[in-house]
Image: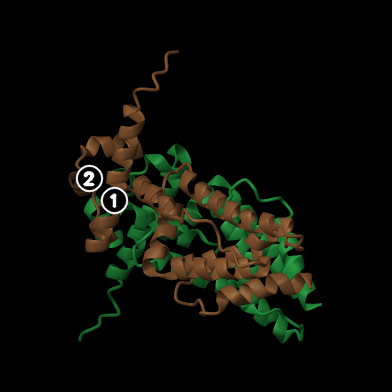
Chain colours: A green, B brown
Amino acid sequence: MRVNPQDPRPHGRAVRVQQAVHAAVRSLQAEHGRQSLTVPKIAALAGVAPSTIYRRWGDLNQLLADVAVARMRPQGPPDTGTVRGDLTAWAEEYLEESASPTGREFLRDMVAGGADCSSALRGGEYARARIGIMLERARHRGEDVPDLEDVIDLVLAPIVYRILFEPGKLPPDAARRLTDRLFERDA
Amino acid sequence: MRVNPQDPRPHGRAVRVQQAVHAAVRSLQAEHGRQSLTVPKIAALAGVAPSTIYRRWGDLNQLLADVAVARMRPQGPPDTGTVRGDLTAWAEEYLEESASPTGREFLRDMVAGGADCSSALRGGEYARARIGIMLERARHRGEDVPDLEDVIDLVLAPIVYRILFEPGKLPPDAARRLTDRLFERDA
């Protein structure tokens, strides 16, 4: 197999297509709302053929799921100096971002995309990795840290469940209350 | 306004259409899988016009969400004699039903259906009502019962989160472990 490192085009072009299509989705969604999104409109704004979108993403649901996953913050998780501070700040930030109508739509797209569950799985992996970073950092500082599975069950799961199935019923202090419970069990 | 109790047709017909369409969805899904479902195929099998389906359900996603909600058990929740026994049996049953590929698809349809979140909200209300029945029954027996919100946060939410975002990672004893935690906190 010949590899030509001088020719970055295919990769560069794939990245440019993805960036243009994602930007078009975000822009149309912000201006006209989710209901108005269609593949031809997105393709026109992104300057690509609709067939490019269908070939790469399959359908609109899968494209929206991909945008939802990509939207998750590229920055590291909060770094406050203690694991309890980090997890509380992270839970508050997660709740604030996801409880808005747009945040809820992103969560929903992640669940609805692809029959193979790949976008929901990536979302789950991503959340698990962020929590893992905070716990690992605290372990290096010599702190006692809660179990990763308990953080998922006791803090992340109730926030996500309520956003998806009982929107509007999340009290503003929910993130802090759930994190407090995680640490009070261990005390 | 005139009401003619002798003429149950509109209501009766609406019910018959719903039953025929729901049955067609379940049958096509069981035979050919979810990916093969289209409104024209469902309409043909149910013996109605596709326009009847579009008028009543909006689109395929919303119809699937409606079938998913209707599938939730019409029977009462488990009745074992103690609130801990009831909640454990209910959590085990819920996990078993929802963790299968079909169960996961139903949960996903409930989340994905309708932009107004109505099917997810109905799913959330339904789960809340079932838990409420078990708690109320135990209160009448004079038992100490856990808080409804705690049952949702500590038992239901982790099961639903893991089915949606980490399928395949649910250990078989998860339902019992989560219910044990709910009661051990209160001990």
- Percent position (x, y) of residue B152? 63, 60
Q: As displayed, is residue A164 above or below residue B86?
A: above
Dot 1 falls on which chain? B
Q: Is the residue under label 2 in contact with that under label 1 (CB below 8 Å)? A: yes
- Percent position (x, y) of residue B89? 56, 69
Q: As displayed, is residue B150 above or below residue A96?
A: below
Please give the count of numbered marks on the rendered protein: 2
Q: As displayed, is residue A150 above or below residue A89?
A: below
Q: Disc 2 on helix, strand or loop?
A: helix
Query: Hey, which quadrant is residue B143 in on the image?
Result: bottom right
Say which mark, if any, is on residue A25.
none
Sequence order check, earlier mark of 1 and 2: 1
Dot 2 falls on which chain? B
Identify the residue shown where x is 49% and y is 77%.
B169
- Percent position (x, y) of residue B69? 44, 51
Identify the residue shown where x is 50% and y is 72%.
A125
Q: Which residue is mark 1?
A: B23
Identify the residue shown where x is 57% and y is 73%.
B175
Q: Which residue is mark 2?
A: B46
**Amino acid type of the residue tagged 2 in the rendering:** Ala
- Percent position (x, y) of residue B52? 26, 35
B22 vs A9, nearest the viewer:
B22
Quadrant occupied by the C terminus of chain B: bottom right
For residue A131, side relative to residue B14 (left or right): right
For residue B31, side relative to residue B92 (left or right): left
Query: Hey, which quadrant is residue B144 in on the image?
Result: bottom right
